[in-house]
Image (cartoon, rainbow, N blue to C red):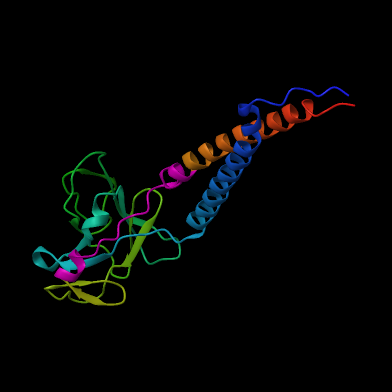
Amino acid sequence: MVAQPMPSRWVRSLRPAGIVLVIVGGLALGLMALASMVTLMSDPATPWVGFVPGQGGTPTVVVGPAGAAGVTSIVVEAPDAEHTVVWAIDRVPGSSWDGSVALGTVPQGFVPTTERRGATIPRGSTLLVTNGCYGSYVSVPHGTLKRGVVTTDDQQVTLEEFAADEVGFTPCGPTDLSTPVRIAGAGLAILVVGLVALVAGTVRRTGNVRLG
């Protein structure tokens, strides 16, 4: 009976190292899969949108400070069966905006995509403020707007309370998942390295058993 040489230290360490790497890689993949699933199933965040009285009592749209930076378009649809677009503006990329615009006007940094139809925007129309992926909706209110407060669909809040809101838009899809995808990719790489180490360590150990 001839005893085969014992495997070297690095060969003996391959198997336990491979097991650790497989566990770490598998955990990373599992956690990122769970995080991605939760992200996709969650309702997207959208900023507060309301109205204040502007010059001459004209309804003026206001968007919370955290959401104003992400706005790309503002659209108003008439309260009819066809949801006719009666006014729409698009933001010039990179332009600054203070988060307010009088209905039917085109503020600096925006361009009209649908010119206002008629002398005024119909009350009861639906206003959409969007970042191109997600949107905030509010109805154009009936009656006279009260000064000192922001009127939304279901309540009136003080200007201070409205300005303190810190909810912005959820970024569009690719940005949402970029970090989990990168971590999952690293986890997959670790898992593959661990499997290779595990297989190599097992083969080396098997090849060095005592033969009779």
Q: In terms of depth relative to the viewer, which is nearer, 204 or 129?
A: 204
Quarter occupied by residue 95: top left
Quarter occupied by residue 164: bottom left
Quadrant holding the C terminus: top right
Q: In terms of depth relative to the viewer, which is nearer, 93 or 141?
A: 93
Describe residue 189's horizontal placement relative to residue 117 as left or right: right
Task: Please say whether residue 173 is one of the residues in the magenta stretch.
Answer: yes
Q: Is residue 171 above or below residue 92?
A: below
Task: Please say whether residue 143 is one of the residues in the magenta stretch.
Answer: no
Q: Residue furthest left?
A: 55
Q: In terms of depth relative to the viewer, which is nearer, 84 or 75?
A: 75
The picture places residue 77, in percent across and down from the top left corner, at: 36, 60
Q: Is residue 109 above or below residue 40?
A: above
Describe residue 78's horizontal placement relative to residue 24 as left or right: left
Q: Is residue 149 above or below residue 163?
A: below
Q: Residue at x 55, y 50 (%)?
A: 33
The range drawn in magenta is 160-180
Q: Residue at x 31, y 73 (%)?
A: 153
Q: Residue at x 65, y 32 (%)?
A: 12
The picture places residue 36, in percent across and down from the top left corner, at: 51, 51
The picture places residue 140, in percent across and down from the top left corner, at: 28, 68
Q: Residue at x 56, y 48 (%)?
A: 27
How many marks are shown on the rendered structure? 0
Q: In terms of depth relative to the viewer, which is nearer, 82 or 10?
A: 10
The picture places residue 112, in percent across and down from the top left corner, at: 26, 45
Q: Residue furthest front?
A: 1
Quadrant holding the N terminus: top right
Describe residue 45's horizontal placement relative to residue 54 as left or right: right
